[in-house]
Amino acid sequence: MRPEDTVNNIDRSHLRGSILFAIGRVVALCINFLVQILTVRYLSKADYGLYAFCLSISGVISVISVFGTDKAVSRYLAVYLHRKQYTQFWSAFRVMLATISVVSCFFCICFFAVWYQGITFNQDNPATSTLLLLASFFAFCNATDAFLLSFFAAVTKPSIVFYRRYLMTPAFKLSAATVVVLSGGGLIAFAVGQLVAVLAGVVICLGVFRRILAENDSLRLAMTTRMAIPTREILGFGGTVVLGDLAFLLRSAVIPIILGFSFDEAEVASFQAVVPVARLNEFVLMAFSVLFLPRAAKLADTQKKQALDSLYNTTATWILLLTFPVFATSIICADELPQLLFGAQYKSSNTILMWLACGFFIQATFGLSTRLMRVAGQLKTLIWADMTINILSLATVSLLAYEFGAKGGAIAVCLTFLLQAGIHQICSIKTMQVSTLTRSMVFHFSVAMTLAFTGLMAVRYLNGGIISCLAVSALASLLMFLLFGKQLDVPGTVPELARLPFISRFIAVETKEEDDVPSMEDNDT
């Protein structure tokens, strides 16, 4: 077998699994979106603003509590398992689990003390301290859940992660929200219901964990073996991830917190209501990353630069083109979506949605380089890059969100995503010699932005409703796939899809007579 055949087989196997995860994430996003709509419409704007404020604090606690262990699974546990170093595997596992437990318990104890002393952060709504206590437990469950799901992706079949993450958890949350709405419960009942839903998911994960050990004798027997625990190495890796995640928090959770202290709950609600809509642009990146990380870690460990370069560029192309329909809809339908989904009181969130959508589309297009550097062990470079990003992002977010409210926060999100993409692209190219920024990717991104905003100007000129906006969005998406769809190698990756007559007309790949493997795209930087 030729080397290029091996490379393409790796890409296709990886992409088939990633597409499965993308489909699952679509299902999960649809269910979570129903929960979001139900929450915003059921609660008053002030109550939803307070709920979003506490959830943002929970998000900050979750990121700190998990301390990068969900990413460290791909960097360490997947590699140890590949080498059959089971003793090192369990040593690293213990460090990760202990880190989550200690940090999470610290926050739970702190917020319990605040609640027990009756300290309130909002004189108009004494329920704030109770909500914050629930948020700390919610963060504990989320951190544990994220670690276990990453563990399953590294040691067992992806189908387990597929069913657990993308089907069961969203269904639990929707069921809890529906029960509270039908029973007429208030804000506290709504928060308790969501906590119970996440806790049920963690319990299921523990059951799956026991089954994995029962089926793998070598892994189970090595569990009791003791050796030196690589605490410093793993915590060092986790520290770099936390620095990167802090930049994420500055683009998401920190903004509602700033708005909550500087403005009223309505301003928080105007911003946070449309964040899930804009984050739909990120779902393909997140779905593809689940299998990209372990694969990239193994290729980086074995110094297979050609395979790593091919894996990165093919995955990035799929992510951009599959994300574009969501991005086009977010921009072209921005004037109609907020009030259609959440009511007339959210009509002013249209500009916020456009800025957020641009930011998350930038992240979807160029964010894979950040994940690549982490699994490849470029920790020192990431530390300096993320420290620079965090300082500049904090200044941008604090200034714009404090001065201009929700709209300023949305602009800050877009600017910080752009800043991170530029810095991480430069670092990955310089340190790893992997072509993460090709001319073709820049061209694809430029065409995507042009099509989306041209469609927005067209619907504003025509003054059409939501049907016209959706039609223009569909037309822009079709044009994008007509221009670049043949570069996806659908026949080689998903042959079942390529057999459909209408689709195969636009995405079939031309092959050379002497080589039945599709030629790779030009990777010059």
Image (spheres, grey):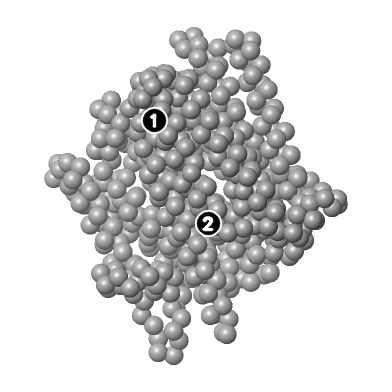
Residue 19 sits above or below residue 261 on the image = below
Q: Residues within 10 Å of mark 1 (few under 14, many from 20)?
A: some
Which quarter of the rendering shows the N terminus? bottom right
At 75% from the left and 64% from the top, the residue drawn is 84
Q: Give the side of residue 272 with respect to residue 115, left or right.
A: left
Q: CA distance from mark 2 to mark 1?
A: 27 Å
At which x and y percent is residue 318?
43, 62
Q: Residues within 10 Å of mark 2 (few under 14, many from 20)?
A: some
The kind of residue on which mark 1 rests is Thr
Q: Residue at x 69, y 29 (%)?
A: 105
- Quarter of the image for residue 506 reads bottom left
Q: Nearer the viewer, residue 82 or 190?
A: 190
Toward which corner of the image does residue 112 lie, by quadrant?
Answer: top right
* 215 sits left or right of 180 in the view: right
The mark total stands at 2
Image position of 264 with respect to 405: above or below: above
Q: Secondary structure at mark 2?
A: helix
Sequence-first disc among 2 and 1: 2
- Give the labeled residue for mark 2: 159
Q: Is residue 343 left or right of residue 356?
A: left
**Can residue 171 be seen here?**
yes
**Foreground pick, 290 / 425:** 290
Q: Position of residue 77 (x, y in %)?
A: 69, 55
Residue at numbered disc 1: 178
Q: What amino acid type should be assigned to the residue bearing mark 2?
A: Ser
What residue is at 63 percent from the left and 71 percent from the top?
Answer: 304
Looking at the image, residue 191 lies above or below residue 157: above
Residue 149 is situated, as x and y percent measured from the top left of the image, at 59, 48
- Which residue shows up at 45% across the image and 10% down it? 124
